[in-house]
Structures are given as C-alpha cells and as structure tokens.
Image (tube, rainbow, N blue to C red):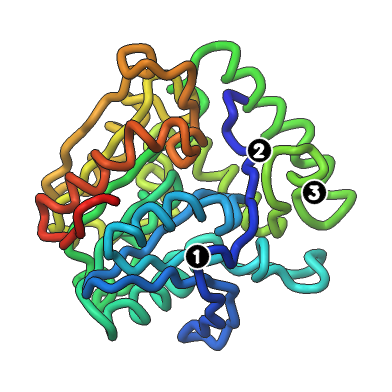
Amino acid sequence: MNSVFAPSPGPVTTGGQDLPLVTADGTRLAATVYPATGPDWLVLGGATAVPRGFYRRFAEHTQARGVNVLTLDYRGIGGSRPARLRGYAPDYADWARQDLAAAVAHAAARGPVYWVGHSYGGHALGLLPPAQRDAVRAAYVVAGGAGWHGWMPRGERLKVQLLWHVVGPVATRLLGYQPLKMMGIGEDLPASVYRQWKRWCGYPRYFFDDPEAGELVRGFGDVTLPIAAANALDDWWALPRSRDAFFAGYRNAPVQAIDIDPRAEGLREIGHMGYFRPQVGAVLWPRMLGWLQGQGLRLQPPG
C-alpha cells in the first residue's frame, strides 16, 4: 500500500526518557520526552497504527537543535496497549481529545508549544480541547488527507477497498481487533478504532461529511494558528487533492499547502511513511523546522 504503514519502530529510549503520561480521563499512556537545552517544546502527533518509536530519529534531530520533543503511543497501541485488545473499545477521537491533549498540557506547563503532525496528527488539531488547541503556536503536518479511496489512484483504491470491505471486517470479527501487525502493516488496532477509521474514510471529506460528527468537528472553526500541510506526490493515501479536501475544514486557519515531488528532490520514494525516514529527513526535516522557526520556534545552530 505505497508504504502506508510498515513502520520500523527502533529503540524508544535512545536520546529520550520514558514518561508515564496520564490523561484527563485517567488513562495511562506510554510516552517519551527528548529533553533539550532550549525553552520550546514540540509535540508529535503520530499516524494511525504507528508507534512512537518510529519517530525517534526525527525527535533526536529536533532535540539536537535545542527543542524538547514529546512523542506518545495512543491508547490501544504500542506501549499503551492493554493486555487484551478484544473487548477494549476506545473512541478514535480520544486519541486527540484525551491523549494528545495530555501531551500538549505537559509541554505547555514547561514552555511554548509547537506541533508536527503525521496523517492522524493533522486531523487531531481541530479535535483538541480549547485550552490545548490555543496553546499550540504553529503546526507542520505531513501526509494529512481525507483518506477517501476516491482520491487515490486506481491500483491503491482497489487495495484499500479490499482492506475495508473484505480482509478488515473478517479479521476483526474473528479476533475482536484489527490485526494489522499480523499483516505487516502497522500496530494492531482496537476494533472500535478500526471501525470509526473505516467509516470516516468512506466520505470524500472524512468526518466533515459524516452526518453524525457535527459536534465532533465543531472546534475546527476555532483553529486560527498557522498550518503548513505538506504532501508527497507519491503518497497515494494523501495526495494533494485529498489534503485540500480535508484542510478546507480548517476554514479560519492560514493553511500553506506544500507539494513535494520526490524526484525533484533526488529521492526515490516518500510515500505515506517516508517523511520520517532518515534519507528523506536529510532533505525535509530542516525545511520542517525552518518553517516552524519562521513561526517563532527557537532553534540552535545545527551541529
């Protein structure tokens, strides 16, 4: 699936310190802080089914520039997975409303907060409670899109339909959760999260088109912080037209759309996951941090 998932987590603690993070509803999450000498904090909102260790190299790169970084595993995945997934039914939106909100609150108590989002991390900004949403000064999002199969090329569209309507439902019914790890395409997901994800990906504008999600998306109109939305031209799950369909929901925020052509950058592939791999990062990470620096993030000189 165009490297949509298949993350390689790597060790979590290199350069970082494990942090037991507790949400407002009392859920304990696995998180990692990468402490730095500067005053600013960057919260990383990861993608669906991707563990926090996948972002380690980017976090260490940012840490080396003097910025404190906080990564986390959402409830139900990675280090925040319960002993038994069958019967565990978290709300997908609570990854933002509770889990990322706790991360932002932790960071905001210690310094100015900036945001880097990957896929779901771009959706999450508008789902944050007001206090945490207002604490974020600027956001750089990669691979953010609506997730609808109609925005994808034909070949990828067929693979996605197979996952949504054949493999996924059968596997979830049999096991009581979505076994993405068994398929080699990410962390296992609670059945409730899988079903909400599938439902929203069935709409051209994701949950903005869901008639039952009116209350959920109400806060998007209150987002006014500057957002950069960068998408690779070979990211079949989040092509620029998919991004534009979703980010229109941030109707009062200044959104800068950035299209990335891998070939023009001398890169073989970016896909949906490559933004955080070191070879691609050598090209993209300085630009990401440079854009945030233009919004006030304080960086130390490299090296």
Of circles 2 and 1, which is in front?
A: 1
Identify the residue at horizontal 17%, vertical 60% (top origin).
Answer: 297
Which quadrant of the rendered structure holds the N terminus? top right
The image position of residue 241, as x and y in percent, is 32, 24
Q: Mark 2 or 3 closer to N-term?
A: 2
Of the residues shown, which amino acid type is indicated by label 3?
A: Thr
Kindly identify which residue carries mark 2. 6
Kindly identify which residue carries mark 1. 15
Identify the residue at horizontal 42%, vertical 19% (top origin).
Answer: 267
| Mark 1: few/some/many CA within 10 Å (<14, 14-19, 20+) | some
Using residue 279 as the reference point, say whether residue 228 is left or right of it.
Answer: left
The answer to which image quadrant residue 28 occupies is bottom right
The image position of residue 107, as x and y in percent, is 33, 77
**SS state under label 3:** helix
For residue 19, above or below residue 169: below
Q: Mark 3 or 1 closer to N-term?
A: 1
Instruction: Choose between 133 and 246: the one closer to the eye.
Output: 133
